[in-house]
Image (cartoon, grey):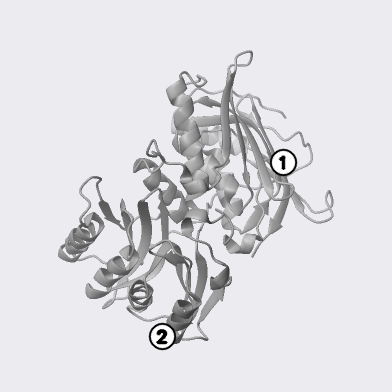
Amino acid sequence: MEINMRFSNDMDDEYEKLFRRLNPPRVVIDNEACKNATVIRVDSANKHGKLLEVVQVLTDLNLIITKAYISSDGGWFMDGTESCFTSSIRSFGVKQSVDHTAIELTGSDRPGLLSEVSAVLTHLKCNVLNAEVWTHNMRAAAVMQVTDEETGSAIIDPEKLSRIKELLCNVLKGSNKSRGAKTVVSHGVTHIERRLHQMMFADRDYERASNDELNGKQRPNVSVVNWHEKDYSVITIRSKDRAKLLFDTVCTLTDMEYVVFHANIDAEGPEAHQEYYIKHVDGSPVKSEAERQRIIQCLEAAIERRVSEGLKLELCTVDRIGLLSDVTRIFRENSLTVTRAEVATRAGKAVNTFYVSDSSGYPVDAKTIDSIRQAIGRTILKVTGSPEELKPASQESPTRFLFGGLFKSRSFVNFGLVKSYS
């Protein structure tokens, strides 16, 4: 029996649940269609944010999306396939947990900031389990998952939580009073990378000074035009390909309240090409030149946030309280600034990645790196790239040190070619 239903936005919850039970998501995973990749087809009820959820699942599974075709019709994502099996997408890469406290930080970037934040947390007897730090356009954002040193679980003491917020906010403010700083402490579950995009977007990191020429670096090529016959706005993006590129752009479009009706994603070779046919959630295309420019600026920022300049340092050692504070203090004492960081604890070991550059903008000196490795431990700190080959930050290619340039990315519903980069 075939059942066709249409429903309005004000449908009550029970009716919507019934509709979704009768029309569950359908997923096809095909290893035969392509010799060197897996083809994934998804047919799902269309809802604002659904595309991001699917892309997020694939990204969290460490898959590289190398091609994608996205289309929606009559409230459904359509991939054109008839043979399929049912699979309900329920998990988006975040495990329900109350065993840690999440701290979100935004403020002006400056050399030594991560060291100062880490020192405060160590002083307050907080252990950093996981963290990610992004910097862009002189702004910094971080999401840190911490536990109470005494209990090994989430921090529940209201006075201690208040003290954490007060001290961290003071650190973030520093001597810069021109732009605000913000500290949020919660026990909720969050997807770290999604939150970082939302935090930096809310912090308006996409706004540039009128004389900002990106110091000679090449920006992504983003264009926005209206297709009046179909009442769509068409966004075209050309940029260097890298890991999680599709997630970053779809995340930003979703947070800006745009709906992707059709899209083509292609990343053959070193360059990625993305084309989106969008409307605002109110059903309108782009209405003004100011709106068009804002979309361009926000997508440029979304692509640039994850791009890492500087030397990549990988640390792997037994985890202990204060480790992050000690390591970042050594960086600061050697005049290195952290441009991006990924901190993780796995089976009792700290697995951390730092991208560092000289705080004065000069090439990182080989003697400095040797001194840092000696202080931290040569066997536990790995250096990717040669310090002698580094150029000043003002001249560096945006993607040179991004995971060694090994990753490819693309997109969705035919999730054309999907590979694992784990």
Disc 1 residue crowd, few under 14, some 14–19, many 20+, Cα 10 Å: many
Rendered image: mark on residue 414:
1
Q: Position of residue 27 (x, y in %)?
A: 69, 45
Please state if 392 lies on the left or on the right of 144 as rendered. Answer: right
Q: Quadrant of residue 402?
A: bottom right
Which mark is in front, 2 or 1? 2
Q: Which numbered marker is on residue 375?
A: 2
Q: Position of residue 353 (x, y in %)?
A: 49, 69
Residue at image position (50%, 86%) is 378
Residue 348 can be seen in this image: no
**In the rendered structure, which amino acid carries the disc numbered 2?**
Ala
Image quarter where the N terminus lies is top right
> Residue at image x 48%, y 60%?
392
Front residue of this view, candidates 89 and 158: 158
Q: Looking at the picture, how far across and down is residue 136, in whole percent?
A: 42, 50
Q: Please say if 388 is above or below 267.
A: below
In this rendered view, identify the residue nearer to me: 120 or 399: 399
For disc 2, the neighbor class at 10 Å (few under 14, some 14 to 19, many from 20) is few
Q: Earlier in the sequence, mark 2 or mark 1?
A: 2
Q: Is residue 107 above or below residue 24?
A: below
Name the residue at the top extreme. Answer: 229
What is the distance, in whole Å, between disc 2 and disc 1 at their CAs? 50 Å
